[in-house]
Every structure is written in C-alpha cells, then in structure tokens.
Amino acid sequence: MDGFCCYDGLRLKVRLMCLGVRGGASVTDLGRVGGAGPAGGRYLLLPGTVTPSTNVPFQGKFVSFSPYSMERLREGELIGEYLLYEKGKPFLRVGVVEKPKFFDEKTSDGIPFWKLVALHGTEVIGVTVNKLCAYWSEGIECGFCAIQQNIKTHLGKSLALKSPENIVEVVLAAIKHGVCKHVTLTAGAIRAEDRGLSQFLPFIRRIREKVSVPIHVQVEPPKNLSDLKKLYYAGADTIGMHIESLDENVRRKVCPGKAEVSKEKYYEAWKEALKIFGENQV
C-alpha cells in the first residue's frame, strides 16, 4: 500500500483517533455500536508505522466535522484496501480490517460467532465474558464506556453472558483461520470482594485445556491481592488493571465507580501482580 505523500505516522494516528473518519458510500460497516473494547470505529492499518493497527472512530457527531474521509478500493478476505482523503484530496492508501467471514459461523448450540467475540486489530480475540456492569446499574459508569450499550438477546447484536464452551469453540476456529495469536478477557464490574475475578477462571481453564494461546485478563484490584494468583494458576499469562487516569480529579469525574478503588490500592495490586506474572506481563 504505497502512500501519496510523506507523513508523520504518529501524528496521523493521533489525529485519526481524535477526529475520526467520515465513511463514503462504499464504507457501509461503521463498526459495532457498543462494547467493552473499541467501539464505534474500525481498525485501520497505516503503512510505515511501528504498530500499524489503529482503532479509528467512524461514528459520533464529531466525526461529521473530520477533515478525513475514506473510500474502498478493494475488498479483502481480512484486510481491505481503502483510500484515505484529507480535506477532499487523496492522501494515503490504508488497510482496513474487515469482519472475518468465519464470524458468521455458529457454535454447536447455534450462536453466531460475532455475537460472542470481537476481533481487535488483526490477531486478538476479545471476549467480554459478562457485559453486565454494577457501575452502569448504579449510574456511576465510566464516561467513555459502552459495555452495556448493545446488550441484546440472541436476536440482537451481542450476548450479555457468554459460556466457556462457546468461547472455546470460537477461539479454536479463530486459531484455525490465523486471526488469534492471543485472547483478551474482560467483563463488567461486579460488587464482590474479588471484584468479579472468579468469573474468569472457568474461561481461562477451558481455553487452556484446548490450546496454549496466550491469555490476557483485565480486572479491578481485588480486596485480597493474593486472589490474583488464582488467575495465574488457572492459566492466564498477562494481567491488566486499568486505573484510567493518575489525576484523581479526572478519575472521580470520568470514572466515579472505578474511582472507589484508591490509587494506592492500584499501586499495591500492580506490585503484587508483578511478583506473580513477572516483568512486562502487568
């Protein structure tokens, strides 16, 4: 994918993530509406950058004012070729990650794969094992989060609760199709001493029984930090505990629910997780 100009890859990434891209007539898939991970956008692959995969907004009122627009040149099996415009002028040929065709396949009990997982970038299967979030039900959800926005039944867009058996089926298929080099597990917040940590264990164990693909888990710091060992012993390889901001005023304003867990608790949890999972795994 040769570009039409020399460009600053990092600067372009930031601009695209902040301003978004207006999809033209040939861009019919604007990304999923909600979810725990990247939502309302598509993954663009920018040539010449160290980490080419970039999630770019295609939805939202602010996107309509973006100087960037896009048209499809060629559809691909996984990566389509598109032309990015800046202020109406051809700017750069980019790749766009398409929904894998095998996502339309179904589990043994009839659930389409796309209702169970998401593809993050080109090689990560993301699973929100439980989309029900206590902070949403209490009106103190994170301002940037859309985890409960598209919860529906089997007839809708996404399942609120997944089963380990279903997820294993999708992971095995994703590995077969070459789009799963690791799995990310996340979930909505749960009011419990372990902050919902235990709900991940059956998923980790079932995946680990079948394959050795690396597993990343995202949790809040549990009351008893030794509970983090349960994730490791179940088979998780890496862990993420996201404080979202080190500015306490920002935390309380944007993440009022998560801000109930102090910064000090996060620091303690990171240190403990480092002992368990090792360097560069936290």
Image: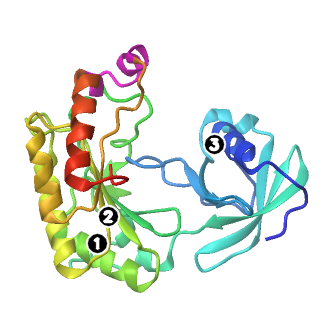
Give yes or no for contact between labels 2 and 1 (Cβ–Cβ under 8 Å): yes
* Residue that mark 2 sits on: 116
Which of the marked residues, 2 or 3, is nearer the chain's N terminus? 3
Does residue 30 appear anywhere in the picture? no
Disc assigned to residue 17 = 3
Point 57% across, 50% down: residue: 41
Point 30% across, 41% down: residue: 241
Q: Amino acid at mark 3?
A: Met
What's the distance in space between the residues labelled 2 and 1, CA to CA? 8 Å
Task: Categorize mark 1 by other alpha carbons within 10 Å: few (<14), some (14-19), many (20+).
Answer: some
Which of the marked residues, 2 or 1, is nearer the chain's N terminus? 1
Task: Categorize mark 3 by other alpha carbons within 10 Å: few (<14), some (14-19), many (20+).
Answer: some
Whether residue 105 sits left or right of residue 225 in the image: it is right
SS at mark 2 in the image: loop
Point 20% across, 74% down: residue: 208
Please state, as top left, top right, bottom left or bottom right, where the N terminus lies in the image: bottom right
* Residue that mark 1 sits on: 111
- Residue 102 in percent (x, y) is at 44, 80
SS at mark 3 in the image: helix
- Which span is picked out in magenta? 248-259
Point 52% across, 62% down: residue: 121
